[in-house]
Image (spheres, grey):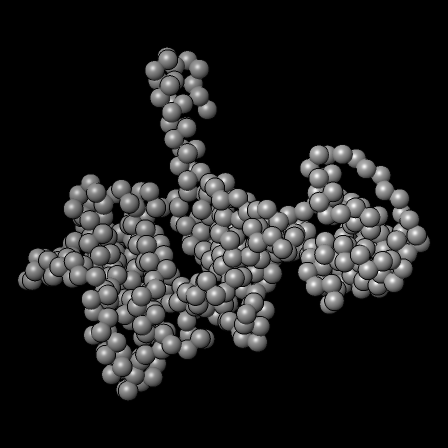
């Protein structure tokens, strides 16, 4: 809340701070909202009917199938019903469009009983949002109406409302653009357009990601806490060299070792299938080796800020070094351990390259690897981006939950280790 007692310049600074915070919040939230909105779209479009910064939802609507542009092919129910009434009453397509554009209100007569019946059937069909039973009733009434009119009238009305008059294929169709089916597909794994007979175990991918990332995070926190405490508190030969080696390892990205890691897992797989290629345990071991060195440096800096006198006092009172570590030190370093947990979990949960190399069978894939199949040939698959967005949104929930659970510890954990290192 703004402080009214402040002067002009401090008040202006506070207003600017609020404006900047709101702007940052919008920048962060807009992509998330856009992904959610894309998840409830049936079509492939990322930005909906109007490309821009504001996320939009495509509403289910009647469209003109002869118009390819999705921003131009929408037609209202009222206009569609009026257009049919006027066509059956004898107006040409040009006159109908001209009447609509001019905004003129024109009353038309129902004419013969057949004409009145087909108009009423068409109105119910349009208001029923393309219901198949109502469509059948309408086409039956239309065929009866055709029998009592001239060939010219049949061709005129047919050219306006059918793409193929002989097959009675309607030109105006009700298009579903808004659907929760994408989220349903995530949980069932079936019903994917262009792959209706295939099964995509997205829930398994989701659980695999949680198992792999969670296991890595737990083991890394335990190993990092023990190693960092030793490097911070004890003096031993080779300590400085070991720290420099750990730091040097971090210079090289994990992708440089992909071939070596692949061959290593290939060899281990001959000894035990649980540790080989296409195994979650093998992937966990690979991830463990990559994250621990960085975390050791991060946590060691935090341990250095805690006075050694706390442990010494505990030992004077009769506590063992292990008891002092568990009961005195660990509660104090909880913020940095929370930071290590979330950094480790998020990093491995989103990792793609190594998982793509190691994992093979559909049931063992993680979320990033599994979802890649929905967008890798997007040009040929018109309706899969919505499924990808829905799955991405659901898949992000574990990270959000973990962040909310540890948010009280994160700020102090990130800043605490910078005091002394």
Residue name at image x 60 percent, y 61 percent: 181
Tag count in the figure?
0
Vertical placement of residue 52 versus 303, above or below? above
Q: Measured from the top left, where is residue 357 in percent x and y?
A: 31, 72
Residue located 13% across and 59% down the image = 248
Residue sitting farthest toward the bottom: 270
Residue placed at 58% from the left, 57% from the top? 42
**Picture quadrant where residue 141 is located:** bottom right
Report the side of 19 relative to 67 (left or right). Answer: left
Residue extending farthest right: 113
From the viewer's side, name the closer residue of 227 and 16. 16
Residue 372 on image: x %, y %: 42, 65
Q: Is residue 188 above or below residue 272?
A: above
- Image coordinates of residue 81 in percent, x first then y, are 78, 47
Q: x and y percent of residue 342 in the render?
A: 35, 54
267 and 129: which one is in front?
129
Q: In the orientation shown, which residue stands out farthest toward the left?
A: 237
Along the line of sight, the residue nearer the viewer: 86 or 410: 86
The foreground one among 187 and 275 is 187
Q: Residue placed at 21% from the left, 42% from the top?
A: 418
* Residue 87 seen in the current view: yes
Residue 150 left/right relative to 195 = right
The image quadrant that residue 208 belongs to is bottom left
Quarter of the view holding residue 296? bottom left
Whether residue 130 appears in this view of the structure is no
């Amino acid at each position: 809340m703004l402080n009214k007692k402040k002067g002009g310049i401090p008040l202006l600074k506070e207003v600017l701070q609020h404006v900047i915070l709101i702007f940052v919040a919008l920048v962060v939230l807009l992509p998330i909202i856009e992904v959610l909105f894309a998840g409830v779209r049936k079509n492939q479009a990322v930005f909906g009917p109007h490309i821009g910064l504001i996320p939009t939802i495509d509403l289910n609507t009647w469209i003109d199938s002869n118009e390819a542009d999705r921003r131009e092919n929408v037609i209202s129910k009222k206009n569609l019903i009026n257009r049919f009434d006027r066509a059956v009453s004898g107006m040409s397509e040009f006159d109908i469009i001209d009447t609509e554009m001019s905004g003129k209100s024109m009353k038309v007569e129902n004419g013969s009983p057949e004409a009145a019946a087909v108009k009423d059937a068409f109105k119910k069909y349009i208001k029923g949002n393309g219901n198949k039973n109502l469509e059948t009733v309408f086409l039956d009434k239309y065929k009866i109406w055709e029998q009592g009119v001239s060939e010219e009238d049949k061709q005129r009305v047919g050219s306006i409302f059918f793409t193929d008059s002989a097959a009675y294929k309607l030109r105006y169709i009700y298009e579903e653009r808004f659907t929760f089916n994408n989220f349903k597909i995530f949980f069932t794994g079936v019903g994917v357009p262009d792959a209706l007979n295939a099964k995509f175990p997205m829930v398994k991918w989701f659980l695999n990601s949680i198992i792999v990332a969670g296991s890595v995070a737990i083991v890394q926190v335990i190993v990092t806490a023990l190693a960092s405490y030793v490097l911070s508190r004890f003096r031993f030969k080779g300590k400085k060299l070991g720290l420099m080696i750990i730091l040097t390892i971090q210079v090289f990205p994990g992708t440089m070792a992909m071939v070596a890691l692949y061959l290593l897992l290939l060899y281990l797989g001959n000894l035990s299938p649980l540790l080989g290629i296409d195994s979650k345990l093998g992937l966990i071991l690979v991830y463990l080796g990559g994250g621990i060195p960085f975390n050791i440096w991060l946590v060691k800096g935090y341990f250095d800020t805690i006075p050694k006198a706390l442990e010494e006092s505990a030992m004077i009172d009769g506590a063992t070094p292990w008891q002092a570590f568990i009961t005195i030190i660990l509660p104090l370093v909880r913020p940095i351990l929370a930071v290590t947990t979330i950094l480790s979990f998020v990093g491995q949960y989103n990792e793609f390259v190594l998982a793509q190399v190691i994992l093979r069978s559909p049931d063992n894939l993680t979320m990033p690897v599994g979802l890649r199949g929905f967008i890798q040939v997007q040009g040929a698959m018109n309706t899969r981006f919505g499924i990808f967005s829905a799955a991405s949104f659901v898949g992000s929930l574990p990270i959000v939950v973990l962040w909310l659970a540890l948010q009280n510890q994160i700020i102090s954990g990130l800043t605490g280790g910078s005091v002394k290192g």
